[in-house]
Image (tube, rainbow, N blue to C red):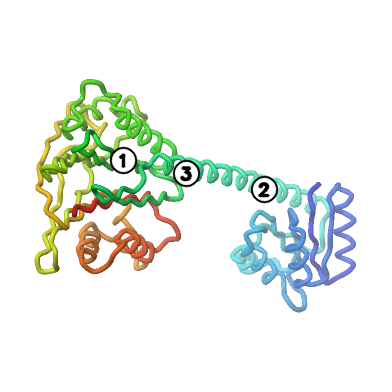
C-alpha cells in the first residue's frame, strides 16, 4: 500500500484530501506545517507528497526544495497544491523540484488521476534505483575479482609495486609480472577500450592466457611476437569490437637489459640517476596499432640497458587523462614531469602520485581505470 503525505495548514483541506485518498486505498498521513511535514517525511518516507504552496513558516517551495535534496526522498513524487495559476508561478515551482500541480478548488477526478500518475512514476524511479544499485554491486564485485587476480608486490630481486583504482563503471585495465625463468621477468600492462564488463572480460582473458602460457609455440621472451600472437587471437570481429593497448617487456637481471614492445599504449617512463643533476629520462615506446584493431599488424622490439638507481613506470592513460577543476585536461607531459620530480624527493612514490592526481581530479571518482606499475632497479 502506497503512503501519501498531505501537508496543509488548513484542517478542512487536510480532512478532504485524507478522505478522498483513503477511499482509493492509500495510507494517508497529515502535517499542519512545513517543518512538521519534513519531519514526517524523514521519519517515514512517503511515495507521494501533496503540499500546499502558501503556508505560514516554511512555504511549499521551501518544503519541496528540502525534500528533493534528501537522497532518501529522491523518488518521492511531489505535488504542489495551489491557487496560483500563472506560467511564471508554475515555472518557479518546477525549477524548485515540484513534479506536478493540483489547482484549488480541488476537483476529485483530477486529484485521482494526478495521484495515480505520480505513483506510477514513483514506482518506476524506485525500480530504476534498485537496478542501478544491483549494477553498481555487480561492478564492485567485478572490480574486486580483477584486484584478486593482480600480482602481489615484489621486493627481491626487483622492487615492484602497483596501484589499481577502478573507475565507477570499471574499465579494462589489467597488468601482471612473473618470472619466465630464474633470470627473466615478463612485465606488462594493458587497457581495453570502453567500460563495464565488456571491457573487463577481454582483459582478464589476456591475463589468464599469458599467465598460463596457453599460446603454444610462442616465444614469451620476444615482446613483438607476444603482441602479434595476441593480435591474431583477439581480432575485434570476434571480440565484440573491443581492442586494447598494451606495453610488454622482458627484463634480464643478469645482463640488466630490457627488451620491450608496445601496441598503441602510453610509453614506459624510465628515470635514472643518483642525483637531480644526473637524472635522465627515457620514454620507452615502439610503433604498433592497438591489439585487435587490424590483422597482420607488425610489432617491433626495442632494447634498453638499465642503470642502477632507476625507476620504470608503466601506466594506463587513466593516470593522466584527468579533467582538472578549471575544466582543462591534464597531459602526459604533466604526468611525466611529476614522475621526474619524485625521483629524489620522496619515498613511496606511488602513494604520492595517487594523492596528487586525486586532488587534481575535479570529480569524486575517476572517469577511467587508473593503473600504474613502478619497477625499482637497484
Q: Secondary structure at mark 3?
A: helix
**Position of residue 12 measured from the top left corner of the image (x, y, whole percent):** 90, 67
Out of 155 and 367, give the one closest to the viewer: 155
Q: Nearer the viewer, mark 1 or mark 2?
A: 1
**Position of residue 243 measured from the top left corner of the image (x, y, whole percent):** 30, 35
Image quadrant where residue 327 sits: bottom left
**Position of residue 160 measured from the top left corner of the image (x, y, whole percent):** 28, 50
Q: Nearer the viewer, mark 2 or mark 3?
A: 3
Q: Which residue is identified by label 1?
A: 176
Q: Which residue is identified by label 2?
A: 121
Residue found at the far top of this picture? 217
Q: CA distance from mark 2 to mark 3?
A: 34 Å
Report the quarter where the C terminus lies. bottom left
Q: CA distance from mark 3 to mark 1?
A: 16 Å
Q: Is residue 152 visible?
A: yes
Reading the chain from its start, which is encountered first: label 1 or label 2? 2
Circles 3 and 1, Cβ within 8 Å, touching? The answer is: no
Reading the chain from its start, which is encountered first: label 3 or label 1? 3
Out of 366 and 47, give the one closest to the viewer: 366
Q: Which residue is identified by label 3?
A: 144
Which residue lies at the image location 82% right of the left edge and 67% below the top edge? 31
Left or right: residue 303 versus residue 368 is: left
- Above/below status of 100 relative to 139: below
- Above/below status of 93 relative to 129: below
Left or right: residue 43 versus residue 242 is: right
Reading the chain from its start, which is encountered first: label 2 or label 3? 2
Amino acid at each position: 500500500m502506497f503512503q501519501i503525505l498531505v501537508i496543509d495548514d488548513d484542517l478542512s483541506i487536510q480532512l478532504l484530501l485524507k478522505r478522498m485518498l483513503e477511499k482509493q486505498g492509500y495510507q494517508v498521513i497529515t502535517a499542519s506545517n512545513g517543518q512538521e511535514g519534513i519531519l514526517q517525511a524523514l521519519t517515514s518516507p512517503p511515495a507521494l507528497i501533496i503540499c500546499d504552496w502558501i503556508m505560514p513558516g516554511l512555504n511549499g517551495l521551501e518544503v519541496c526544495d528540502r525534500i528533493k535534496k534528501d537522497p532518501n526522498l529522491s523518488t518521492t513524487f511531489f505535488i504542489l497544491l495551489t491557487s496560483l495559476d500563472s506560467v511564471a508561478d508554475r515555472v518557479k515551482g518546477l525549477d524548485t523540484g515540484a513534479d506536478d500541480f493540483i489547482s484549488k478548488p480541488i476537483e476529485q477526478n483530477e486529484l485521482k488521476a494526478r495521484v495515480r500518475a505520480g505513483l506510477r512514476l514513483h514506482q518506476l524511479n524506485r525500480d530504476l534505483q534498485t537496478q542501478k544499485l544491483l549494477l553498481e554491486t555487480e561492478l564492485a564485485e567485478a572490480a574486486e575479482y580483477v584486484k584478486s587476480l593482480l600480482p602481489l608486490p615484489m621486493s627481491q630481486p626487483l622492487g615492484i609495486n602497483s596501484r589499481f583504482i577502478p573507475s565507477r563503471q570499471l574499465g579494462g585495465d589489467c597488468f601482471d609480472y612473473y618470472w619466465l625463468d630464474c633470470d627473466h621477468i615478463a612485465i606488462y600492462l594493458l587497457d581495453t577500450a570502453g567500460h563495464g564488463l565488456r571491457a573487463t572480460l577481454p582483459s582478464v582473458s589476456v591475463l589468464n592466457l599469458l599467465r598460463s602460457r596457453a599460446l603454444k609455440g610462442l616465444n614469451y621472451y620476444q615482446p613483438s611476437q607476444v603482441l602479434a600472437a595476441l593480435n591474431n587471437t583477439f581480432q575485434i570481429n570476434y571480440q565484440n569490437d573491443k581492442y586494447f593497448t598494451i606495453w610488454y617487456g622482458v627484463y634480464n637481471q643478469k645482463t640488466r637489459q630490457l627488451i620491450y614492445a608496445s601496441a598503441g599504449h602510453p610509453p614506459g617512463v624510465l628515470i635514472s640517476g643518483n642525483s637531480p643533476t644526473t637524472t635522465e629520462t627515457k620514454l620507452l615506446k615502439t610503433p604498433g596499432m592497438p591489439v585487435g584493431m587490424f590483422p597482420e599488424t607488425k610489432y617491433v622490439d626495442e632494447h634498453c640497458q638499465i642503470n642502477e638507481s632507476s625507476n620504470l613506470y608503466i601506466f594506463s592513460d587513466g593516470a593522466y587523462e584527468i579533467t582538472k577543476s578549471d575544466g582543462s585536461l591534464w597531459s602526459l607531459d604533466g604526468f611525466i614531469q611529476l614522475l621526474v620530480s619524485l625521483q629524489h624527493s620522496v619515498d613511496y612514490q606511488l602513494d604520492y602520485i595517487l594523492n596528487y592526481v586525486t586532488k587534481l581530479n575535479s570529480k569524486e571518482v575517476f572517469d577511467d581505470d587508473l593503473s600504474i606499475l613502478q619497477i625499482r632497479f637497484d
